[in-house]
Image: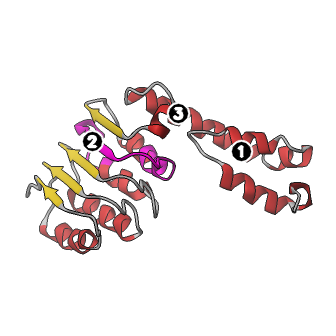
């Protein structure tokens, strides 16, 4: 079926499915197919542009030159880059467009008490499909962050995770009770390290 034969709503759905914050070219090209589609996707294109600019700024902040470099990265290691909770929330939303990322190390105490919570809250089902190694070091996870991480894992995020290292995290007994079943359901998980107690 030709794109022009689809209804405006159907064309909008196709546009949304093609939106990739790290590589918006395909969605933008589609929106240029017709005047009707260009008009129908104007708001979406503006949001995509704003989201792409925010992602590009995050890439620079973590030491990557471009969104393409992040999209293709197998490892991202952030040591005291000054990432705030908003940056981690954005990183969480990018999980669905990071198919190659295998190792994520975050040593970001500046993210504050809700940084890990905001990161985990934005990670969707099936996000970070290749990630096998996750380190959250010197970051306050807390009970709320551990519960949100458990929920993300329960939704199917990080399906290939083999190693989870969480240190100096201020996780209490109640949060461990919430997190343990989610960790047990990860078929590839081999190692849980450096878990500290409050």
Residue 182 location (% of width, % of height) = 28, 71
According to the image, label 1 marks what residue? 27
Image disc number at residue 68: 3
Question: Which quadrant holds the C terminus?
Answer: bottom left
Numbered range of the magenta stretch: 90-115
Q: Residue at x 45, y 62 (%)?
A: 126
- CB-based contact (under 8 Å), mark 1 and mark 2: no
Is disc 1 placed on a helix, strand or loop? helix
How far apart are the two marked residues, 1 and 3, measured between alpha carbons?
Answer: 16 Å
Residue 40 location (% of width, % of height) = 83, 50
- For this view, does 31 lie left or right of residue 170? right
Colour convention of the picture: secondary structure
Q: Which residue is more in the foreground, 78 or 2?
A: 2
Q: Which residue is more in the foreground, 45 or 10?
A: 10
Image disc number at residue 105: 2
Sequence-first disc among 2 and 3: 3
**43 w.r.t. 148: above or below:** above
Sequence-first disc among 1 and 3: 1
Disc 1 crowd, CA 10 A, few/some/many (<14, 14-19, 20+): many
């Amino acid at each position: 079926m030709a794109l022009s034969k689809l209804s405006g709503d159907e064309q909008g759905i196709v546009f949304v499915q093609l939106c990739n914050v790290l590589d918006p070219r395909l969605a933008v090209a589609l929106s240029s197919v017709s005047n009707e589609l260009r008009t129908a996707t104007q708001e979406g294109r503006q949001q995509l542009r704003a989201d792409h600019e925010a992602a590009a700024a995050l890439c620079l902040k973590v030491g990557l030159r471009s969104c393409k470099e992040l999209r293709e990265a197998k490892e991202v290691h952030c040591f005291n880059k000054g990432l705030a909770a908003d940056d981690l929330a954005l990183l969480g939303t990018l999980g669905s467009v990071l198919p190659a990322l295998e190792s994520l190390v975050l040593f970001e105490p500046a993210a504050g008490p809700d940084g890990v919570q905001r990161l985990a809250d934005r990670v969707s089902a099936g996000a970070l499909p290749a990630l096998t190694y996750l380190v959250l070091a010197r970051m306050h996870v807390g009970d709320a962050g551990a519960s949100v991480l458990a929920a993300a894992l329960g939704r199917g995020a990080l399906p290939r995770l083999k190693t989870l290292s969480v240190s100096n995290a201020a996780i209490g007994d109640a949060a461990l009770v919430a997190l343990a079943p989610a960790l047990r359901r990860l078929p590839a998980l081999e190692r849980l390290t450096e878990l500290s107690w409050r």
